[in-house]
Amino acid sequence: MAVKKAKDLAQTNDFQEKYPSISSFKFSNKWIDCFMVHHDLSNHRRTMVSQHLPEDLLEKQQSFLSFVLYRRIQHNYPIQFIGNMDETPVAFDLPSSYTMEKRGSKTINIKTTGHERSTFTVILSCMADGMKLPPVFIFKLKNMPRETFPNGVFVRTNEKGWVNENEMIWWVENIWSKRIIDSSSDPRSLLVLDFFRGHLVDSVKQKFIEKATNIAVIPGGLTSRLQPLDVAIRELYNDWMTNKVHELTPAGRIKKPSYSLVCSWVKIAWEKVNSSLIRKSFKCCGISVKTDGTEDDEIFDYDSLMIDEDKENDINSRDDELFEEYEAEEEENHNNWDEV
């Protein structure tokens, strides 16, 4: 964390003016060790309570994986037609869970913009072959901001800044349906979704039927195990957002980033996600492993994704705090086995 922060600061104009040769400086492990010893610093972690998995975990998990396998055998989807979509509330400021402080400190203060509870929604989606679809941003505004947004992203606004029925229908028409450029018709596809209520309304289900898309709904409480965008990928853009260098106000407070700036941050973080990691995440969740059982040993093989257990718990819990208003009541199983 400290090395990355130092490298980011070294690219700013202020530091390059004060230290002209800093851009070529190598921030090695030896340097960070000496820096921390010299200033009597140590790493401190903000502690949080992670999400509780449901008591009937195994039953729900097996039912979902059986449904996915049933659909894949039924339709024999090519791997590039199996996808995952996730809407994530993202704060304008994601305070890091780690900081450096003097050894023996009892109280650790983490500096923020004061906007860590001000959120917008990011829709990320990807395919099991590693393809990434364009990110969509939904801001809590009545009108579109008068800013220049980066190419390759889509910006929407509504009064709550959430994914609602209209936003889902827009996404299906403008992102999901346009992922296949050279196709005159919609290929039979499978899309994995969480149980957010906006995915399950009749109009959205009908739109998926029109687009020849079967949906597989992840049971409540199991996205950290069964959603490819949760098991590894979200960690990357959350970490990237927490480590960005913020501008300061004249009074020395951290500025809230602009709408276009957070779009640029997420776009860059999304572009940095390796396609190989996406492919592994789908297999780790049991969604794209071979149907003959020869790759079953890759299911829930989190070590292959190189996820640090502590970071994973921290990210899941942080998202839970922001996701409270998105959660739907758990009802019946939403996967329709009888649908064609």
Image (cartoon, rainbow, N blue to C red):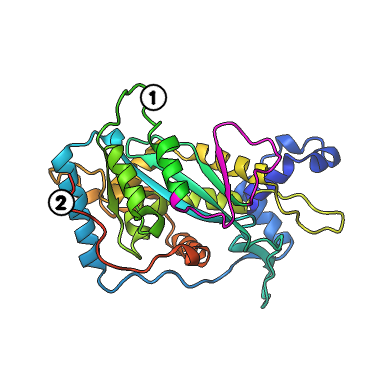
Q: Nearer the viewer, mark 2 or mark 1?
A: 2
Q: Position of residue 82 (x, y in %)?
A: 29, 40
Q: Residue furthest bottom?
A: 106
- Is residue 112 a member of the stretch shown in magenta? no
Task: Describe residue 280's horizontal placement relative to residue 307 as left or right.
Answer: left
Q: Secondary structure at mark 2?
A: loop
Q: Residue 140 falls in which quadrant of the image? A: bottom right
State the predominant SS element of the stretch in magenta.
loop
Q: CA distance from mark 2 to mark 1?
A: 30 Å
Q: Position of residue 147 (x, y in %)?
A: 70, 39
The residue drawn where x is 55% and y is 36% is 153
The residue labelled by disc 1 is 181
Tell me if I can see residue 179 in this picture: yes
The residue drawn where x is 79% and y is 59% is 253
Reply above or below: 134 against 58.
Answer: above
Task: Describe residue 69's horizontal placement relative to residue 327 as left or right.
Answer: left
Viewer-side residue, 259 vs 288: 259
Viewer-side residue, 226 vs 84: 84
- Mark 2 residue type: Asp
- Is residue 143 a member of the stretch shown in magenta? yes
Task: Describe residue 285's horizontal placement relative to residue 104 as left or right.
Answer: left
Viewer-side residue, 138 vs 70: 138
The residue labelled by disc 2 is 338
Q: Position of residue 263 (x, y in %)?
A: 61, 42
Viewer-side residue, 11 vs 263: 263
Q: Position of residue 107 (x, y in %)?
A: 68, 76
- Mark 1 residue type: Ile
The residue drawn where x is 28% and y is 48% is 215
Q: Residues within 10 Å of mark 1 (few under 14, many from 20)?
A: few
Magenta-drawn segment: 141-165
Q: Residues within 10 Å of mark 2 (few under 14, many from 20)?
A: few
